[in-house]
Amino acid sequence: MEKKPIRRNEHIAKLSRDHHASLMFCWKIRQGIKLNAESERMAKYVAYFLDHHFLPHFKEEEEILFVPVQDKKVQKAIDDHVVIRNMAKEIIADPGDKQKDLSMLADLVDDHVRYEERILFPFLENELSEEQLENIGSQLAGEPAKDTFEDEFWVKRS
């Protein structure tokens, strides 16, 4: 059975585009592991992505999207953010031989994105009024951050 793309409310579509970047982060980390890239190189990418993508994205979700609905589904996402932040910071603080931790981080981010896209966002789209969604959308204005990290550790070099 073919899966159809998820239709996202236009006012929170930016967050879904951010999620696509997060899934690419997971793919790059997994490719780096397959290619035996040095953990230090991948930890630098984790630091870059944390600062340029995860932290601003989490802030938008927690301070804009999640505010109107206090619910266990929302709390799970917030709890996931804490775990992702902490795991990323641990990898950055001690990057030596962290293949297992990097793999766990990629899995955690992947699971989190899929949770938000498949469960949380559809729930919020039903819970929030069109006016609330429009207000949220106006606060989320702008393009998702571009991934401009230069060390392509995930690319096999001959």
Image (tube, rainbow, N blue to C red):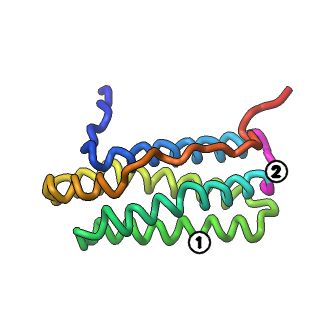
Q: Is residue 33 left or right of residue 5?
A: right
Amino acid at pointer 1: Asn
Q: Residues within 10 Å of mark 2 (few under 14, many from 20)?
A: some
Quarter of the picture containing the C terminus is top right
- Out of 151 and 5, give the one closest to the viewer: 151
Q: Which mark is residue 38?
A: 2
Q: Is residue 2 left or right of residue 53?
A: left
Q: CA distance from mark 1 to mark 2?
A: 21 Å
Q: Is residue 49 visible?
A: yes
Q: Secondary structure at mark 1?
A: helix
- Residue 36 forms part of the magenta stretch: yes
Q: Residues within 10 Å of mark 1 (few under 14, many from 20)?
A: few
Name the image quarter holding residue 128: bottom left
User: Looking at the magenta stretch, what is its main secondary structure?
Assistant: loop
Quarter of the picture containing the N terminus is top left
Percent across and percent down for residue 22 are 52, 48
Percent across and percent down for residue 32 are 72, 43
Which residue corresponds to mark 1?
Answer: 86
Q: The magenta stretch spans which residues?
A: 35-40
What's the residue at 33%, 64% (across, down)?
64
Q: Secondary structure at mark 2?
A: loop
Check contact, mark 1 vs mark 2: CB within 8 A. no
Q: Is residue 123 visible?
A: no
- Give the residue furthest to the right: 158
Mark nearer the N terminus (1 vs 2) = 2
- Residue 76 forms part of the magenta stretch: no
Q: Is residue 133 left or right of residue 42?
A: left
Percent across and percent down for residue 94 are 77, 69
What's the residue at 70%, 52% (across, down)?
45
- Out of 148 and 5, give the one closest to the viewer: 148
